[in-house]
Image (spheres, rainbow, N blue to C red):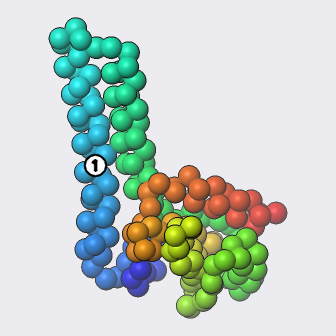
């Protein structure tokens, strides 16, 4: 994880890093490439089956499953660095509230502040993927992102996006109450 560009991240509602994230681009590009290949090869297979009148229900089902996986990968990579906005009160109250809330929800995660940011990290283990929680405090807004890490804790996992979104939804619900 590199240094976060706060102003650009707040403006775009997406995590942006100051350093040249070459490996990050390669990693996300790889998932886009795999998803595109899944979709294109399966679509081509369905088309060939239609033109040759050799299209079984099993073949259609399998190809639609592969297309669904491709679409899921694209959705996941698009939402991987997305920041969710939670309406709060003032900055200091938000900092205290989020620290207390997150340390209670994620007991196996270490949290620390750097200026107007709260970071949480859980190291990758054989039994659990790593996790990075990034919270940016902007006036009365709280911007939050949760990203699971795999492969020794250094690669973003597009396979945990629904889990990340469910955690953020739960955090948002607790903050609003």
Q: Is residue 114 above or below residue 95?
A: below
Point 41% across, 69% down: residue: 151
Q: Is residue 85 left or right of residue 170?
A: left
Point 64% across, 55% down: residue: 166
The residue at the far front in this view is: 126
Depth check: 73 or 82 in front? 73
Q: Is residue 175 above or below residue 57?
A: below
Q: Quadrant of the C terminus?
A: bottom right
Q: Quadrant of the N terminus?
A: bottom left
Q: Is residue 18 above or below residue 60?
A: below
Estimate the x, y position of residue 58 in percent, counting from the top left: 38, 19
Estimate the x, y position of residue 125 in percent, counting from the top left: 53, 73
Residue indicated by mark 1: 34
- Rate crowding at label 1 as few (under 14), some (14 to 19) or many (20 or more) other CA atoms within 10 Å: some
Depth check: 141 or 63 in front? 63
Estimate the x, y position of residue 5 in percent, counting from the top left: 41, 80
Point 65% across, 61% down: residue: 167
**Which quadrant of the view contains residue 122?**
bottom right
Estimate the x, y position of residue 115 in percent, counting from the top left: 56, 91
Does residue 5 appear in this view?
no
Point 18% across, 12% down: residue: 51
User: Label 1's element?
Assistant: helix
Does residue 70 appear in this view?
yes
**Which quadrant of the view contains residue 55?**
top left
């Amino acid at each position: 994880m590199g240094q976060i560009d706060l102003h650009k991240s707040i403006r775009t509602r997406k995590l942006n890093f100051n350093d040249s994230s070459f490996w990050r681009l390669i990693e996300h590009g790889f998932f886009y490439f795999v998803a595109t290949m899944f979709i294109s090869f399966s679509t081509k297979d369905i088309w060939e089956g239609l033109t040759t009148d050799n299209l079984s229900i099993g073949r259609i089902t399998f190809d639609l499953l592969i297309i669904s996986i491709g679409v899921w990968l694209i959705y996941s990579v698009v939402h991987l660095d997305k920041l969710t906005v939670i309406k709060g009160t003032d900055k200091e109250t938000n900092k205290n509230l989020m620290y207390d809330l997150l340390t209670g929800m994620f007991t196996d995660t270490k949290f620390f502040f750097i200026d107007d940011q709260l970071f949480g990290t859980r190291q990758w283990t054989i039994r659990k993927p790593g996790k990075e929680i990034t919270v940016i405090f902007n006036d009365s807004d709280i911007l939050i992102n949760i990203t699971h890490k795999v492969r020794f804790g250094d690669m973003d996992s597009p396979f945990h996006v629904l889990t990340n979104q469910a955690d953020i939804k739960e955090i948002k619900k607790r903050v609003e109450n």
